[in-house]
Image: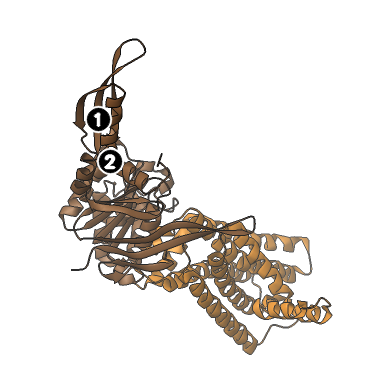
């Protein structure tokens, strides 16, 4: 069975004109990724890492300079493939002069729905997103959280098999975050594949089965959450050190990586300090992200 | 439903809900009512005054509706990014381009139809005889709407800001009305290389001055109107085709 979605050597460069000079800004570079069906995949990275570019390439609103983007084994430019995709952008980019149900009907018609099927899908999508079917006022009167629900309803409208969500928790209150998390898990349990792109590492850790880390436009690490956490757990140590201070003995602590451990112990001993305890740190996805970015020479390398 | 028809309905809804359609329709009715009032100020030539003013209003609405419509769409689709949730739908970009053209042309045609009905109604109520210019003016205005809706699409897909798009469209309209003098200007060109540029502009811009049938001394014959309609369809078809090509690989 083909992967749910795949980036095969994909590169994308943005060209900007500054003072009559064309400047290349790399978006993503030679990204290779294949995500199996039926999982929640999280794309992590700092700002400008290329996550949103990758997502725009995956839903077909941006086209790669090199490589191929495949969803469910087909080219994402093929309308039949896009019929199986749902996209939730970071901000609810919906025309604010229209009503929720009216807008969903328009999107539904463009997705090939009509008649009673269209009406029943609009009603179901509004209900799943927690919106009142009777509300007809324009979207400009909705709060940000409500607009995010409208954007979510349009994702579910045509019953996609793969959902791409860019920062799906952004703008939601704590109850909304919880509802969104439960909904995404329900969709995964129903056999859908979900790809989320997020800064909220704790949320990704809690929600995702697999995670990819992007830095400088490249995919620098990919695996299950367990694999990445194991990687972090063996790499960091906390040393409790007793050392002679200016007046008296003082206790301090140091945090070092696995590769620095031997040298640090030697250095402490040679300055007369005593290492009282060596604690293996409980790894977190945040550490993996920052360590991986440091190793990849990203902006937080120091 | 075909995706291009679905897009056309979506575009029409956007423009209606954004009140552009109501604004232009209201302006059209106000212009015609104003033309009627104007007749009280010109005793003896009431009929000529009324039709001159009403037809001028219809012609301007034919120009304004696709130009303003495509500019508003450009703001919403590209600058407010509402296009993202449209382009992820299962349709080709060519279908989207065709649907957008149909929606813009539909808006102009609807407004023109409303204006035409108001004019015809006013003539009937005032007991006047049928106006021989009404049908030719309506056909010419329809042709202009079709051409400018296609140009509106092309310009908004090829430019990156609504202001640039609006200025380019207005420039094309002005050049379109000046098209008869372009060959004369090309003949006068002294700067090397300017003559082919002027000729290229002459062949590329729509010859909108040919559509100003209200200025003709006699109402145009049927063959002329058929030629205008044919020209409009061919020109719009070519512009929509180029738009689809331009938009095929554009990132949004």
SS category of the residue bearing label 1: strand
- Identify the image quadrant of the C terminus of chain A: top left
Residue drawn 77% across the image and 76% down it:
B194
User: In the figure, is residue B38 to the left or right of B222?
Assistant: right
Number of numbered tags placed on the structure image: 2
The chain identifier of the residue carrying mark 1 reads A
Q: Which residue is mark 2?
A: A259
Chain B takes which shade in the image?
orange
Q: Which residue is mark 1?
A: A238
The chain identifier of the residue carrying mark 2 reads A
Q: Residues within 10 Å of mark 1 (few under 14, many from 20)?
A: some
Rendered image: mark on residue A248: none
Q: Is residue B189 above or below residue A137?
A: below
Q: Quadrant of residue A290?
A: top left
Q: Residues within 10 Å of mark 2 (few under 14, many from 20)?
A: few
Q: Is residue A47 visible?
A: yes
User: In the figure, is residue B97 to the left or right of B204?
Assistant: left
Residue B188: give x, y in percent of width and height: 84, 79
Which residue occupies the extreme bottom position in the image? B223
């Amino acid at each position: 069975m083909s992967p749910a979605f795949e980036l095969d050597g994909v590169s994308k460069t943005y060209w900007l004109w500054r003072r009559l000079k064309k400047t290349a800004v790399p978006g993503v570079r030679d990204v290779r990724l294949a995500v199996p069906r039926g999982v929640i995949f999280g794309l992590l990275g700092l700002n400008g890492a290329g996550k949103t570019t990758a997502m725009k390439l995956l839903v077909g609103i941006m086209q790669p300079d090199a490589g191929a983007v495949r969803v469910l084994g087909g080219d994402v430019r093929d309308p039949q493939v896009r019929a199986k995709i749902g996209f939730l952008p970071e901000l609810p980019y919906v025309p604010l002069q229209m009503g929720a149900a009216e807008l969903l009907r328009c999107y539904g018609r463009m997705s090939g729905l009509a008649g009673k099927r269209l009406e029943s899908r609009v009603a179901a999508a509004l209900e799943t997103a927690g919106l009142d079917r009777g509300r007809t006022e324009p979207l400009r009167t909705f709060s940000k959280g409500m607009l995010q629900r409208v954007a979510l309803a349009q994702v579910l409208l045509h019953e996609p098999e793969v959902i791409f969500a860019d920062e799906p928790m952004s703008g939601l209150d704590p109850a909304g975050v919880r509802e969104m998390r439960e909904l995404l898990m329900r969709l995964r349990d129903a056999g859908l594949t979900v790809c989320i792109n997020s800064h909220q590492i704790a949320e990704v850790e809690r929600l995702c089965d697999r995670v990819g880390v992007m830095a400088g436009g490249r995919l620098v690490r990919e695996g299950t959450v367990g694999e990445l956490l194991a990687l972090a757990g063996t790499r960091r140590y906390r040393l409790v050190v007793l050392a002679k201070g200016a007046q008296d003995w003082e206790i301090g602590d140091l945090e070092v990586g696995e590769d620095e451990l031997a040298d640090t112990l030697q250095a402490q001993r040679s300055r007369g300090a005593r290492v009282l305890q060596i604690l293996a740190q409980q790894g977190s996805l945040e550490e993996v992200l920052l360590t991986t970015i440091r190793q990849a020479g990203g902006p937080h390398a120091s | 439903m075909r995706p291009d028809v679905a897009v056309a309905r979506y575009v029409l809804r956007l423009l209606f809900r954004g009140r552009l359609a109501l604004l232009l329709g209201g302006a059209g009715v106000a212009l015609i009512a104003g033309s009627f009032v104007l007749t009280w100020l010109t005793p003896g030539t009431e009929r000529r005054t009324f039709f001159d003013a009403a037809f001028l209003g219809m012609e301007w609405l034919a120009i304004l509706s696709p130009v303003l419509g495509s500019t508003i769409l450009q703001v919403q689709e590209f600058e407010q990014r509402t296009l993202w949730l449209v382009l992820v739908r299962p349709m080709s970009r060519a279908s989207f381009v065709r649907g957008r053209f149909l929606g813009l042309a539909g808006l102009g045609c609807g407004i023109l139809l409303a204006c035409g009905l108001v004019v015809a109604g006013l003539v009937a109520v005032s007991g006047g005889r049928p106006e021989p210019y009404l049908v030719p003016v309506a056909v010419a205005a329809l042709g202009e709407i079709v051409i400018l809706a296609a140009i509106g699409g092309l310009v908004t897909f090829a430019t990156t800001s609504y202001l640039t798009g609006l200025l380019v469209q207005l420039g094309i309209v002005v050049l379109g009305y000046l098209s008869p003098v372009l060959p004369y200007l090309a003949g006068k060109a002294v700067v090397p290389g300017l003559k082919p540029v002027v000729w290229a502009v002459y062949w590329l811009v729509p010859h909108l001055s040919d559509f100003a049938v209200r200025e003709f001394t006699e109402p145009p014959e049927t063959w002329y109107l058929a030629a205008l309609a044919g020209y409009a369809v061919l020109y719009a078809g070519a512009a929509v085709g180029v738009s689809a090509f331009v938009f095929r690989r554009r990132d949004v």
